[in-house]
Amino acid sequence: MNEASTKSVSRAFSGRALTNRIMGEAGIGIVLVLLILFFAVLAPNFASRANLSNIATEITINTILAVGMTFVILIGGIDLSVGSVLALCAVVAGPILVNDSMSATVAIMLAVLAAVLTGLAVGLINGLITETWKIPAFIVTLGMLYIARGAALEKTQAQTIYQFPASFTDFGRATVLGVPAVFLVALALVILGQFVLSKTVFGRLLLAIGNNEETVRLAGHRTKAIKVAAFAIAGACVGIGAIIYMARLNIASPIVGTGYELTAIAAVILGGTSLFGGKGSLIGTLLGASLLGVLTNGLLLIGVSDFQRQMMTGAVIIVAVVVDAYRQRFSRRMAME
């Protein structure tokens, strides 16, 4: 890898990416604050400490999945398999947790490792197939969605695994200074991921590939390896999400995760990451997941029906995509001037 070319590519895209990132985060941050104030006025219990803690808990899994999804979308890809892969990771780790032949501590460590490695392996497969045969990630991950779901159902014969060690499920309910411990895991992943994107060569190359892959390739970088790594990161995040799900609900079900890929994509797009790749941040993704959580919780508290909540959430997502399209046009116009 040529260090000089790496610096030149990074300089070419980092300034523009930083400007777009700040604009996106500022916009979604303002909307989130206004939404919180709106629901705080309409629903007296919304701003209570218990409810805010509940929101943080509810957005944890979506945030974790969205962290991985951000890496994939930044390179112009997509991963529709994350919900099904979460179920697969859960049913792989679940039997380890209920194995009475080992101590709870050992079982938990092995289960976490098994879930993360399963997700990582599936992510690698997605990335390798996509990049080796140049097949759209949409098609590859759609196929993996069915493969992973079928594998989860086959492994368990459609049965749910439950009764995990108390020390494992206690973590799902634990708090640290009033903040849910599971949310702190999601927050740690956001911080780590943002550091990778903004402070490492790998992260800057991801952004550069999303903007202009050919430029990065001509600079001497192995774009295939970088893009496969993005899918692998997404898969590993799914494995972590599966562990959090199991710790919270004390079950490993082969039917869990249906629709999770859509909410993860929504959080990423709402957070300002471009569907076309090359622009976005994990801080924005966290804000996007928080906005979805606040919207769902607030609408529930003011008595909006489930069907109406789905309609309103869908409308918000469509508006976010339209705004992203206009932002793309504005960026292109600014680049030409």
Image (cartoon, helix red, strand yellow):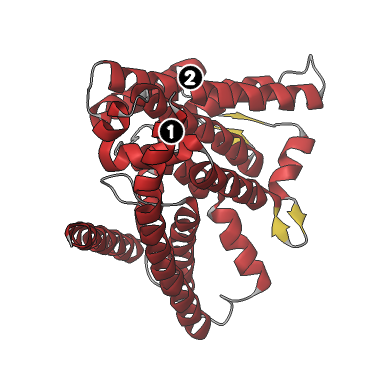
* Amino acid at pointer 1: Ala
Q: Is residue 44 above or below residue 177?
A: below
Any part of residue 299 in sight:
no
Q: Is residue 225 above or below residue 57?
A: above
Q: Tag count in the figure? A: 2
Residue 229 picture location, percent across and down: 44, 27
Q: Residues within 10 Å of mark 2 (few under 14, many from 20)?
A: some
Q: Identify which residue is drawn at 49% across, 36% down.
A: 201
Nearer to me, 180 or 96:
180
Residue 67 picture location, percent across and down: 48, 44
* Amino acid at pointer 2: Ala
Task: Tell me which corner region of the image, top left, top right, bottom left or bottom right, holds residue 333.
Answer: bottom left
- SS type, badge 1: helix
> Tag on residue 4?
1
Q: Residues within 10 Å of mark 1 (few under 14, many from 20)?
A: few
- Quadrant placement of the C terminus: bottom left
Task: Tell me which corner region of the image, top left, top right, bottom left or bottom right, holds residue 245.
Answer: top right
Q: Is residue 117 above or below residue 258?
A: above
131 horizontally vs 69: left or right: left
Task: Tell me which corner region of the image, top left, top right, bottom left or bottom right, holds residue 276.
Answer: top left
> Tag on residue 144?
none
Residue 89 picture location, percent across and down: 53, 26
Q: Earlier in the sequence, mark 1 or mark 2?
A: 1
Residue 145 picture location, percent across and down: 34, 28
Depth check, mark 1 against mark 2: the one in front is 1
Q: Which residue is mark 2?
A: 121
Q: Identify which residue is drawn at 48% across, 51% down.
A: 282
